Amino acid sequence: MDNTNRPEFFSRHDGGKAKLPFSSSEYERRLAALRAAMATRNIDAVLFTSMHNIAYYSGFLYCSFGRPYGCVVTQDKCTTISANIDASQPWRRSIEGNVIYTDWKRDNYWRAVRQLLGGVKSIGIEHDHLTLAQHEKLTDFLEVEQLIDIAPIAMGQRMVKSAEEIELIKAGAAIADVGGFAIHSAIKEGATELEVSMAGRDAMEVAIAKRFPDAEFRDTWVWFQSGINTDGAHNPVTARKLVKGDILSLNTFPMISGYYTALERTLFLGEPDKESLRLWDANIAAHELGISLIKPGATCSGICAEINRFFASENLLQYRSFGYGHSFGILSHYYGREAGLELREDIDTELVPGMVVSMEPMLWVPEDTAGAGGYREHDILVIGEKGEVENITKFPYGPRHNVIS
């Protein structure tokens, strides 16, 4: 077929602009902060390629299916780049412009990028996202004199939440609790992990639709684990049937316009044995200690050190599974992470107002050890403008509520 008269890229505006997760002024604030950083560092334009940064600055959360997507930000424009398969939906969900590239000629994506950049010489890119293959395409299609890693700058901006973001995150935490209560009610001997998980997921999606009727509904999920399957925090759901004596792990994750919140709790089906109860109580004590340490001026590494000292005093540090918490915002189990705000030994970031972090200690006790299994609690904390700290997770933890008879 002759493709000479078929466009390499184009724009089309079917339907009006959709209601985005945040106000126009919120996106303008984000772009203004980015443009100020660009001016300071003499960056002429930025090409974002990750789901989280494109969504953060434009409102559009893409679905790649192996296709490249982008967002070009200059001092006066913010334009998303999307595949023809999506039609006008990306334009409806972008705060400003959109260009659609076609796939009947290889590399039309990069031709669209070249047109939008207009021959600038200094470009910001995401070093932690752009693949080697796409980096080669960039250098083939663009006459670039300087490539600057924009990812740390963008991450630093995302780590401090606006009032609008905090409002959405609080709503997400409440919806995570809804899923938790649905799961709690569904737990019974003989039920499968999958059946219990579905109850939590369905309850959260109904709650999201009620609270956010203009949202796109996707990606909300549950990890409900039992027995040996509790050993990993991210172990997928199985069809294993619950039996008396099982240690259980409840994990709900409502996704609202790319924003992730979470609830995680340890439970038991039937009374736990003495050693399991000791381990559970110790992890709860670490959880409560960690919550008390979240405050302005504290450092991620300093908080980690305090909890490590506690676990060492209980002879349990060898069972610690991962870092004690992380930031919240545009992230998911397959995109995004604000790695500069994780409660780990090697992160020295200082907590400031506007940050939102989890406290989630976990002990992993191996099989054939008394009390074997994974013990994990998870709350979300918001540091307010005046330094006050609010725990926005309300689902109860501990044996009094989470031993299922």
Image (tube, rainbow, N blue to C red):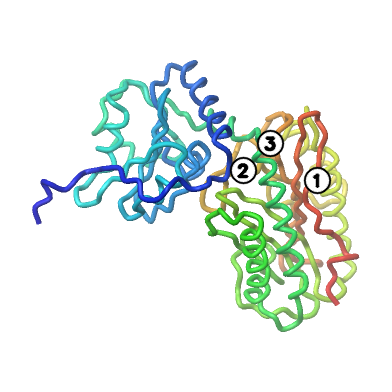
Residue 237 is labelled as none
Specify which label sits upstream in the sequence, 2 or 1.
Answer: 2
Rate crowding at label 1 as few (under 14), some (14 to 19) or many (20 or more) other CA atoms within 10 Å. some
Task: Label 1: state its secondary structure.
Answer: strand
- Mark 3 Cα shell of 10 Å, populated few (<14), some (14-19), many (≥20): few
Quarter of the image for the N terminus: give it: bottom left
Question: Residue 40 appears at what percent x and percent y?
Answer: 49, 15
- Residue 174 percent across, percent down from the top left: 74, 55
Q: Dot 2, crowdedness within 10 Å: few (<14), some or many (≥20)?
A: many
Contact (Cβ within 8 Å) of mark 2 with mark 3: no
In the rendered image of this protein, does residue 137 appear above or below residue 93?
Answer: above
Q: Secondary structure at mark 2?
A: loop
| Percent coordinates x, y for residue 189 in the rendering | 76, 82
Nearer the observer, disc 1 or disc 3? 3
Task: Check the image and name the residue furthest to the bottom.
Answer: 190
Mark 1 sits on what residue? 391
Residue type at the position of mark 3: Ala
* Residue assigned mark 3: 163
